[in-house]
Structures are given as structure tokens and as C-alpha cells.
Amino acid sequence: MFKRILVANRGEIACRIIRACREMGIVSLAVYSEADRAGLHVQMADEAACIGPPAAAESYLNMDKIIETARARGAEAIHPGYGFLAENPEFARRCERAGVVFIGPNSRALELVGDKIRARQTMEKSGIPIIPGMKRVAADFAEYGAEAKKIGYPVMIKASAGGGGKGMRIVCSEEDLRPGIEGGQREAKAAFGDESVYLEKYIEDPRHVEFQVLADNYGHIVHLFERECSIQRRHQKIVEETPSQALTPELRRKMGETARKVLEVSGYNNAGTVEFLLDRNKKFYFLEVNARLQVEHPVTELTTGVDLVQQQIRIAAGEKLSLGQDDLVQRGHAIECRIYAEDPTNNFLPSPGKILYLREPKGPGVRHDGGIYSGWEVPIYYDPILAKLIVWAETRESACARMVASLDDYVILGIRTTIPFLKEVISHQKFREGETTTGFIKSYFENWREKEGPAEGLTLALAAAALDELTPSQKDGTGAGPKKEVYSPWQIIGRWRIGEKP
Ligand code: MV4
């Protein structure tokens, strides 16, 4: 087993990986940019090294610096987390060459799954269902026109180097095809440095169901069932859950077997996620492989009892999978909500700033994966994810109730967050009925406004009440004086201000 692992990430996922290291008796080495000196991951890790200026390109994406730091500090392996360098074949290759273990798939598999057209070819050859459409880039526009006709409108333009919804367009008729292709090529070139685009049949309002898979270096592959991730806003997942309401045991078995096969034919190792689209007739299609530990991995951990990060580390260290497919069962229901530093009342604009007060929900079946603390300033430079709130309960209904109660308990002051929005999503009748398709947010939350926002008047009234309530002895911070149950965070803040605590 490794003695020391460099964690090439920040925020909640770095903290999650550091925790796994600690439990396994592995020394964790955090890296941080100058903007993250005070980051929670830096405080949690056994060791830490600054790797450069705030801009990600000069720090968390600086391959040479990160590999050099691993070597200089004696880390035998690098865990990339998600985002940044996680799915970069070039980085995996440089690690391989430098004799540092990349905790993730081998560079060849990363290259294959990162190239959507090549992946489609590979899957089709192996009898894995793919969305009807092109399996290579067209030579000219006429060929795109002919292909679109063959597929039948509406069609979807996708970038071969894309993924996660980047560079996608829907084209409904022939006259819109040329501008769509040209725009798509331009966008793909700018975003990925590769202008290759292809066409697929457009599947209307599908569900996004993905399967978690683990593959060791000896050809043993198991799947850990599905995650339903249809609740998205502009290709940003918001809520994830497992099991999916859309699967029957039979469909689950078929999709799980297919997911295993996808990894097998890709020469893939370590953890991966196979994404499928599920259409209205419950037909499923291979979409892409996410070659990383995913943000939503905890819902799988809570329902299967498997620690996915520890599994990744064991596989990377050359251990054989100790789990067989028959050892794995889903138990109960898990839901995850992503907490972002974004203002849901203002078009989800990032809301960086200082967290004045943080009270995390806790209780039976409640897990909080965070990278934040009271007094920490959310930097402007990175993805504004703050934390993930994950709940487990015996049934979906009780998991929903537990999630709403936990969101109600959750207090973050000083910045705007997506918590009020999430409460209404989980409380929505259609969500409760399991009507979770990719069109959910657009259908029911397009122009969402907070029902009872933190109205300025109410805030002021509460603050005033807090001040009014303080007796001189409390102002001294002695805690004496009349007792009253107080839940308003504004009163807490009011007391701090008067008492001049943090
Ligand atoms: C599609 C599709 C409909 N038809 N492909 C978006 C993310 C990327 N991985 C693939 N995506 C889609 N591909 C065809 N042929 C609809 C989507 C899609 C979607 C997929 C998963 C989750 C949310 C989504 C939201 C809008 C569109």
C-alpha cells in the first residue's frame, strides 16, 4: 500500500480523499494555490504544499509542478479528484512516465473514452446500444446533410471531444443544419481545440441514469448499481439519487451488465461511471464514460456500504477487487443535494464572500461532505460548489423528508447559496412522484423566485429582536440572564456582534 498520497484537488472532494487516506493509514499531502492557503483541505491534510498562483492553469492544472511536488515530497501516488486533471490522458501519461501512480484509469483508456466518436465505434462493435447516429466525422457539409436525413430530424450535434453537455445543439429542420454545424465546429474548436462534430438522433426529455463501476488491474469488474441524475440545470447536476424510480430489477440487471461490458471493451481500470440515456419507452443507450470519481459518488456509498475512494486507492496500489458482483446489494434510498455559492434568486450568479456562520445539519442518516467552515472566504477563482448534503433512509419518501428537514436545519450566513432552491425542488409534487426527467427544472423552475426570501424587513426585525433580548450580563458574554430557545441565525449573529466573538 502507498505510504503517502498527493491530493491534486481542493474543496470538498480533497477533504473526502484526505479522510480516506487517514482511515487507511496513508499520509495525505494537500496541494493548494495561493488563494487556498486557508482552505479546509489544507488544514485537514497531514502535509501541504503551495503549487502556485490562484489561477487554476498555474496551480491545480499545472502538471509539471504537481508531479514534481509528488516526487520531491515522497508521494507514490496522486489522486486527482474530479475536474482539473482528473480525466486528462496527458497527465495520466506523465505520471506513468515519472513513476508516480495516477489513481484513476490508464492513459489509453482515458484517451478512448474521452473521444466520443471512437467510443461510439468501440461500443457498437461490442453490441452495446448507442444512440442512432454517426460513427465518424463527415468529410463535408453534404455528408452531414445526408446523415441528418437518414437519422431523421430532430438531430443533435455533439462535439467528439465534448461531454457533459458542452458544445451540444439541437437541430429541428434541414435549414438550421448548416448554421448549427458551423457554430458547433467553431465552439468545439474554441473549447477543446478539436472541431470534430457528429450527429445523433435527438431523444426527447430522457432520463439520465448512470452506473458506478469498479475494475481492478486484473480484469475483475463489478457494478455498484445506478444513480439517477436527471435533475440538472444547464447541464449542472443539482440533485442525484439512488435507486432510480425508472428501473425495474430486470432493466437494472441489463444496464449493469452493459456497464460492466463497456469498461471491459475499453481496457478500463479503476473507478468509472457509465452514463446512459433512458427514453420514454425505457430503452437505454450508452452515452459516455466518466473516467473519474464523481461528485455524486456518496449516494452509491450509502446504499452499498462500499467506500469508493478506498476502493480506488486499493485498485491503484495493485490489489485485487475483494468484492464480487453477488456481494453487492442496494439497501434503502439515498439522495444528494449540491450546495453551491450561487444566488438562485439572481440567475444562479456566483456568490463568493466570507462565510460568517455555518451550521451543518446532522442526525441519523445525514452525511455532509463539505470543504467550508465559519470565517472562511469562498474564493472567486473556482467552481462554487461548497458542500454536498447526502441523506439515507429506508424508503424514498422518508429520504425526501429527511432531506427537507436537513436543508431546513442548514445555516450558511454571509453568502447566498442554492439551499432555498433545493428545498423547493425536493418538496415539489412531481419530484415526490418520481417524475425526474432532464426537463424537470426547465418545466417547473424556469423563472423560480424564492417564496419567502430573506426579506430585508424580516432580517432587520430579527436582528433588532436579538439585540433587544440581550441583557447586560449576556453582552458580557457570561451567558447569564433569562434563557429562551432561539433558532434564528440572525439572533446568533446579533449576539456575536455584541459579544465580539468571531
Ligand atoms: C442527448 C440528449 C438527447 N438526445 N443526446 C447532455 C449531457 C451529455 N452527456 C449528453 N446530453 C444529452 N444528450 C441525444 N441524442 C439529451 C441530453 C441532455 C441531458 C442528458 C443528461 C442529463 C441532462 C440533460 C439535459 C439536457 C440534455
Image: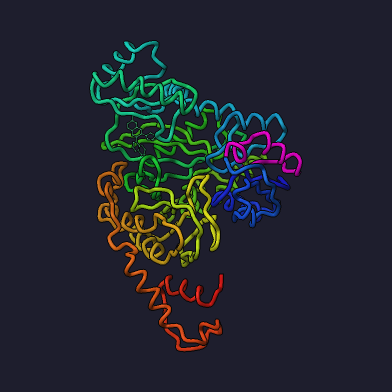
Q: Is residue 451 above or below residue 177?
A: below
Image quarter (top left, top right, bottom left or bottom right) of the C terminus: bottom right
Quadrant field for ligand 1: top left
Q: Is 362 colored magenta in this rendering? A: no
Residue 58 screen position, x and y as percent: 61, 37
Question: Quick one: quadrant of the N terminus?
Answer: top right
- Judging depth in this view, the residue of 288 and 457 nearest the camera is 457
Q: Is residue 315 left or right of residue 68?
A: left
User: Of 390 and 139, which appears nearest the observer?
Assistant: 139
Left or right: residue 236 versus residue 67 is left
Residue 357 lies, with reference to residue 82, above or below; the image says below
The image shows residue 237 at horizontal and vertical percentages of: 40, 45
Asked if residue 432 can be seen in this view, the reply is: yes
Q: Is residue 370 left or right of residue 280?
A: right
Q: Which x, y percent locates residue 13? A: 55, 49
Give me the residue at 54% from left, 44% from top.
Answer: 324
Segment colored magenta: 56-79
The answer to which image quadrant residue 320 occupies is top right
Relative to 285, does residue 42 appear above or below in the rendering?
below
| Residue in view at x 45 percent, y 63 percent | 413
**64 inside magenta stretch:** yes
Q: Residue 61 sits in which quadrant?
A: top right
Q: Residue furthest bottom?
A: 481
Q: Residue 270 versus residue 87: which sits nearer the camera?
A: 87
User: Residue 88 at x, y = what percent?
Assistant: 57, 32
Observer able to see residue 319: no
